[in-house]
Image (cartoon, grey):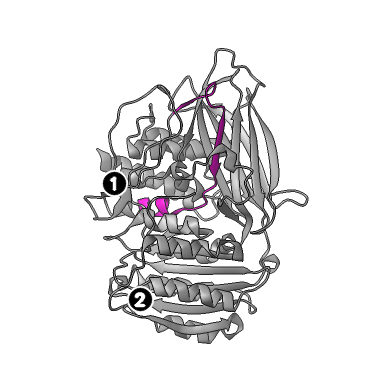
Amino acid sequence: MKTKLLFFVLTVAGFAFASCSMNDYYDGFSGYPEYSYDEQTSPESGDNFDVIKENPFVSTSEQPVSTFSVDADGAAYAYMRRCINSGFLPDANSVRIEEFLNYFTFNYADPEGNETLAINAEVGGCPWAEKHKLIRLGLKGKTLKNEEIPDANYILLIDTSGSMSGDDRINLLKSGLIAMIDYMKPSDRIAIITYSGSVKKVLESTLVKDAQTIKNAIRGLSASGATAGGAAMKMAYEEATAHYITGGNNRIIMCTDGDFNVGVSSTEALVEMVESYLDKGIYLSIMGFGTGNFQDARMENLSNHGNGTYTYIDSEEEMMKVFVNERSHFYAVANDTKCQITFNPQYVDSYRLIGYENRVMNNEDFEDDKKDAGEIGAGQTVTALYEIVPTEDFATDAILADFDVRYKKALGEESRGLSLKIKSSSARPSDEFDFAAGIAAYGLWLRNSEYKGTASASLAEELVGPSLDYDHLGLRAQLAELIHKAASLKK
């Protein structure tokens, strides 16, 4: 998705709440709103976020088709957690509900046959709007064993400016990277490039079988000076290209606090550079650290333009989640993944996509393989929710919509399609449906969304409760605790 502002500064999301009036549903719909990138500043932290104009309800008779790119980022959720644990509510304009949903792994079935992506869907009541329904869409990338994942060519692009100093920044980063090395294959490669007042290649591309050399280079990192990153990004792409592994996982992992203030190229030049590598099979992942001067949207958008992901690191546990427990997510099994929903006006009066505001696409982009979209890693799940207003003819076992997905197994290939009929049902929705609804209710409540209806912290807690059995990392139970803490902060 193209955006208006891109800048080379890493940040992550943060959240507080804004008050609006409640709409039952659309009023004179004339197309999706343009996503705004006017920056807002959190009074608690000084972090900057773009204004989010929530997707409205859309008349099915006027526009039955809805198209969006997947978004597997989780930065907004981790930043919210840091805010709550620090004793304040996050800024409303950084509550990206899609990132709350996709922070978690859902209990979805793996792909079958020759596909590397599977899709599913279910329908149930909308907990915060009695007369409405929810449609939950699910996607899952093929799970791979460690030995099935191709060799990695990682370029660690590390901000070592003075603002990265501290236990929650450079020291946290170093401990996580060292832990990651122990789980990589001997045939994987790592290079390290640092940037502060100048750019330096600290470590030439080195095989992980020489783990001690790599760990020593990581341990030797320290933070001082100003931040200059344009030249560092160029060097990182050159290093990735020089040691490119055909069919491998060629990825730049940029780690920064976002205080990027020296030697910055123009936004247009930076975007052009990143986009020039899209078809060359080089991915970009961005990791954010610390608080106080984040330019959140700019880094999210940069990762979007670089076939990448955007993550916020707030603790050692999150480092282990990203770099160890979910390291397979770094290998994309579904590229340029797009979803298109065609609603049936006989049963659906109107609909609203919850979240994904900066991922909405033109309907004609769905079959255009030149249009960039999001990636899904091995074993990774993506979830989306539509809130719908049923017609008077709504019935059980009715076909409410067609769910179509296009994705590429590898960048540069021709896309392939998956399709599913979405039917209403009298059966009770799954615990995963309730969990997704609970996350959305929490996000709507945090935002004080005009579409929140009766959403509340207590409703969110009630909805996520039954799903805690599927929680091997304890993250769902932690969510329930965060909701409870947030409720006490909002009183």
Residue that sits furthest to the top in the current view: 392
Where does residue 307 sit, x and y in percent of width and height?
A: 54, 59
Which residue has dot 2 on it? 160
Picture disc at residue 252: none
Which residue appears at 68% of the width and 68% of the height? 247
Q: Which portion, as a residue range, is magenta?
A: 57-80
Q: Is residue 296 left or right of residue 377?
A: left
- In the rendered image, is residue 101 in sight? yes
Which residue has dot 1 on it? 89
Residue nearest the viewer, comparing 165 with 429: 165
Query: Of helix, strand and loop, which one carries label 2?
Result: loop
Per the model, the C-alpha gap separating discs 2 and 1 is 29 Å
Amino acid type, callout 2: Thr
Place residue 18 in its image quadrant: top left
Query: Of helix, strand and loop, which one carries label 1?
Result: loop
User: Is there a contact, CB below 8 Å, between mark 2 and mark 1?
Assistant: no
Where does residue 352 sit, x and y in percent of width and height?
A: 48, 30
Which residue appears at 35% of the width and 80% of the height? 198
Q: Does 89 appear in magenta? A: no
Q: Nearer the viewer, mark 2 or mark 1?
A: 2
Where does residue 482 sit, x and y in percent of width and height?
A: 37, 47
Q: Is residue 143 left or right of residue 302?
A: right
- In this view, 407 is above or below 31: below
